[in-house]
Image (spheres, helix red, strand yellow):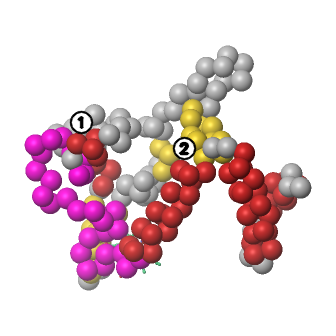
Amino acid sequence: MILVSIKARCHNVASFIDLNRCVQSPETFENPDQFWPDRYLLTKYGTKPGVDDSSFRDNIIFGAGRRICPGIQTANLSLTINVTNLLWAFTYSKAKDPLTGFEIPIDPSKMANGFVLSPLPFECSIQPRNQKIAGLIHNHFVDAIDVFKQYEDALQQEDKEHVAQVRSHLV
Ligand code: HEM
């Protein structure tokens, strides 16, 4: 989730909406730090029942005012397609410690510093939902190699090595 958004730029003035602060308000959200998607079953914006959310809107992440992002539809459609594909294809769970077998906890408060907040790397487990899906992904991945190769000249050496290593496992 992108948590900070530029609001407007005019006459050399920049103003910013601190979305992180907005979505972390305990007056507005029940346990704002907790990953609890069910909150959106209670109210449209996941606010506490009874909170006035009439000033909330769907696309605040894309900015506000005259300079609002013109790529909203492209971005939303692209995200919908990609996220639904990822949910269709994989199951997601916590990684397990190979020695103890216990789940490795994830601390969602560990964020990288910066203008746009993003989580620090964390361990998790992402597995294809079944063999049929794994086979489909494999075949599409192989088919896409020639398409991607045209754009790989500019990759950094580290990324080139990663791509070569991934492809070396393909049959
Ligand atoms: C999830 C994806 C995206 C997010 C969260 C996002 C967010 C934003 C935000 C916050 C702004 C600043 C708005 C402001 O100043 O108030 C912006 C500007 C802009 N975005 Fe996006 N954007 C996304 C995707 C896209 C895409 C896919 C395109 C193009 C196809 C695009 C094109 C632009 C352009 C051209 C501006 C500058 C508009 C201007 O200053 O007049 N964005 N975006």
Give coordinates of residue 152: x percent, y percent: 77, 72
Please give left or right for residue 86 compared with residue 151 in the image.
left
As rendered, which of 70 and 92 lies closer to the eye? 92
The x and y percentages for residue 112 are 50, 47
At a point 28% along the width and 74% down the height, the residue shown is 8
Secondary element at image label 2: loop
Residue 120's tag is 2
- Location of the C terminus by quadrant is bottom right
Q: Is residue 112 magenta?
A: no
Instruction: Give the x, y percent position of residue 24.
Output: 28, 43
Which of the labelled discs sits on residue 30, or is there none? 1
Magenta part mainly helix, strand or loop?
loop
Neighbour tally class for label 2: few under 14, some 14-19, many 20 plus, Cα within 10 Å = few
On screen, residue 73 versus residue 92, left or right, reads left
Q: Which quadrant of the figure shows ligand 1? A: bottom left
The answer to whether the beta carbon of the residue marked 2 is less than 8 Å from any atom of ligand 1 is: no
Magenta part of the chain? 44-71
Asked if 110 appears above or below 167 in the picture, the reply is above
Q: Residue at x 48, y 33 (%)?
A: 107
Residue 11 in view: yes
Q: Residue at x 43, y 37 (%)?
A: 109
Query: Is residue 46 left or right of 165 when viewed as pictured?
Result: left
Q: Secondary structure at mark 1?
A: loop
Task: Single out the mark in the foreground, 2 or 1.
Answer: 1
Placement of 49 over or under 68, stated as above or below: above
The x, y position of residue 167, in whole percent, is 84, 58
Nearer-the-camera pick, 105 or 10: 105
Q: Quadrant of residue 85?
A: bottom right
Q: Residue furthest top?
A: 100
Say what amino acid the circle numbered 2 marks.
Leu
Specify the amino acid type for callout 1: Glu
